[in-house]
Image (spheres, rainbow, N blue to C red):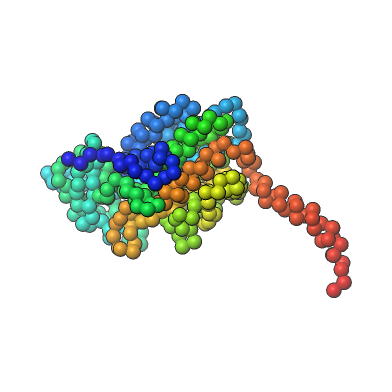
């Protein structure tokens, strides 16, 4: 019987971070069924005293890392979601068929005949999709439930994911059943670990949200419940479909916006400035600044619901397991160098002496400089002869 054993090899310069990424990417998850990843996050933080973990009324997980007595007026809150498009078993309709709910955005044409694995205890049960039930019309037709032929009974509530192996490293890339957004959540844990180990003054929040794939309902609840303190500047971390002008391996990406909205300009400028500082002191750190309009992310929810918010992402291959080139499902993948650099960026965001002011300070300073330099010339040339 197959067992859940994460492999431990990694090309990351930081083996501890590589291990966390591998372990996280091995854990099954689906919208409204994030409990196994939450267990991992809880165990991880329980071992780190400076990290205080609380859960809100809908199960989102908030971790505060507070070291020293430094008070920060506008601390950063980095967020990532804990789910990935997947199945949750409903009931056996015969001894060899399970009916399962599907949640998340994958086109219906990829389902029938595709292989699935349901996670039961410490092992899994393999299955193949026989039929699907959809709602809506093209191009908005969505899968609601599926009948899946399975090799043995699957209990109600079991998580089902596409039948791909545990994480594998090939070159600079790691391939997994679902990097979106477990790689983001893993990067946050790695940053928490570094902050705790380095013992340098910081005060930062990390929010792990539920059920993003159905329309970021966990993040919306976190705003309504004020799970994130209102004074925070929110940075939502995502893996986002690679774009022609935002390639994987070229560094994590500061998102100025998504498909639905543009983010708080001052929050984006703050992250940009901290990345520029980091790039000056660490020559291996690279980053990009782009509009990632392939999808809508939680930053749009945070901005709309009253927070100063922006986004950071790492480019993702085979977004939502769709391998468009081959016309079939495949493992998602991200670049390990991007992952490593985003962890560094989070650490700097958490402990930088540069405080978020709610204004674009760097741009204002540059404008004041230009104004001062050219004020006289501008005035003196006003009436110059033609
Ligand atoms: Zn997604």
Please identify the quadrant where the N terminus is shown.
top left
Closer-to-camera residue (79/370)? 370
Q: To which quarter of the image does residue 383 belong?
A: bottom right
The residue lying at 29 percent from left, 57 percent from top is: 329
Q: From where the camera sits, is residue 209 visible?
A: no
The number of numbered badges drawn on the structure is 0
Q: Position of residue 21 (x, y in %)?
A: 38, 42
Instruction: Using residue 100 as the reference point, say whether residue 141 is left or right of it.
Output: right
The residue lying at 86 percent from left, 62 percent from top is: 380
Image: 226 above or below 298: above
Q: Position of residue 55 (x, y in %)?
A: 42, 31
Please identify the quadrant where the C terminus is shown.
bottom right
Q: Position of residue 376 (x, y in %)?
A: 84, 58
Q: To which quarter of the image does residue 353 belong?
A: top right
Q: Position of residue 343 (x, y in %)?
A: 48, 42
Instruction: Using residue 349 as the reference point, say whether residue 239 is left or right of it.
Output: left
The residue lying at 53 percent from left, 51 percent from top is: 286
Instruction: Using residue 279 as the reference point, say whether residue 143 is left or right of it.
Output: left
The residue lying at 59 percent from left, 26 percent from top is: 69
């Amino acid at each position: 019987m197959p067992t859940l054993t994460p492999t431990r090899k990694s090309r990351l310069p930081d083996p501890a971070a590589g291990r966390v990424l591998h372990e996280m990417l091995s854990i099954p998850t689906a919208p409204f069924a994030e409990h196994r990843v939450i267990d991992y996050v809880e165990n991880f933080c329980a071992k780190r005293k400076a990290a205080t973990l609380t859960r809100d009324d809908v199960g989102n997980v908030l971790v505060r890392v507070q070291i020293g007595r430094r008070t920060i007026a506008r601390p950063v809150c980095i967020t990532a979601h804990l789910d990935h498009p997947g199945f949750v078993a409903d009931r056996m309709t015969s001894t060899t068929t399970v009916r399962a709910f599907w949640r998340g955005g994958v086109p219906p044409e990829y389902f029938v005949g595709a292989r699935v694995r349901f996670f039961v205890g410490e092992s899994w049960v393999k299955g193949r999709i026989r039929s699907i039930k959809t709602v809506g019309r093209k191009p908005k037709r969505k899968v609601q439930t599926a009948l899946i032929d399975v090799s043995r009974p699957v209990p109600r509530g079991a998580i089902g994911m596409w039948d791909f192996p545990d994480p594998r490293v090939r070159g600079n890339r790691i391939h997994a059943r679902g990097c979106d957004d477990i790689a983001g959540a893993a990067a946050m844990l790695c940053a928490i670990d570094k902050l705790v180990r380095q013992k340098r003054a910081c005060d930062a929040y990390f929010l792990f949200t539920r059920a993003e794939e159905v329309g970021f309902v966990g993040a919306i609840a976190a705003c309504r419940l004020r799970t994130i303190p209102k004074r925070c500047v929110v940075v939502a971390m995502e893996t986002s479909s690679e774009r022609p002008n935002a390639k994987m391996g070229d560094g994590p990406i500061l998102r100025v916006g998504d498909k639905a909205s543009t983010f708080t300009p001052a929050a984006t400028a703050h992250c940009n400035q901290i990345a520029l500082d980091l790039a000056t002191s660490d020559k291996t750190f690279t980053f990009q600044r782009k509009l990632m309009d392939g999808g809508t992310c939680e930053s749009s929810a945070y901005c709309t619901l009253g927070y100063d918010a922006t986004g950071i992402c790492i480019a993702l291959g085979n977004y939502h397991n769709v391998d468009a080139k081959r016309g079939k499902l495949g493992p998602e993948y991200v670049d390990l160098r991007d992952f490593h650099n985003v962890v560094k960026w989070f650490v700097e965001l958490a402990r930088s002496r540069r405080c978020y002011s709610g204004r674009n300070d760097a741009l204002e300073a540059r404008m004041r400089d230009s104004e001062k330099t050219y004020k006289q010339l501008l005035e003196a040339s006003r009436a110059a002869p033609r």
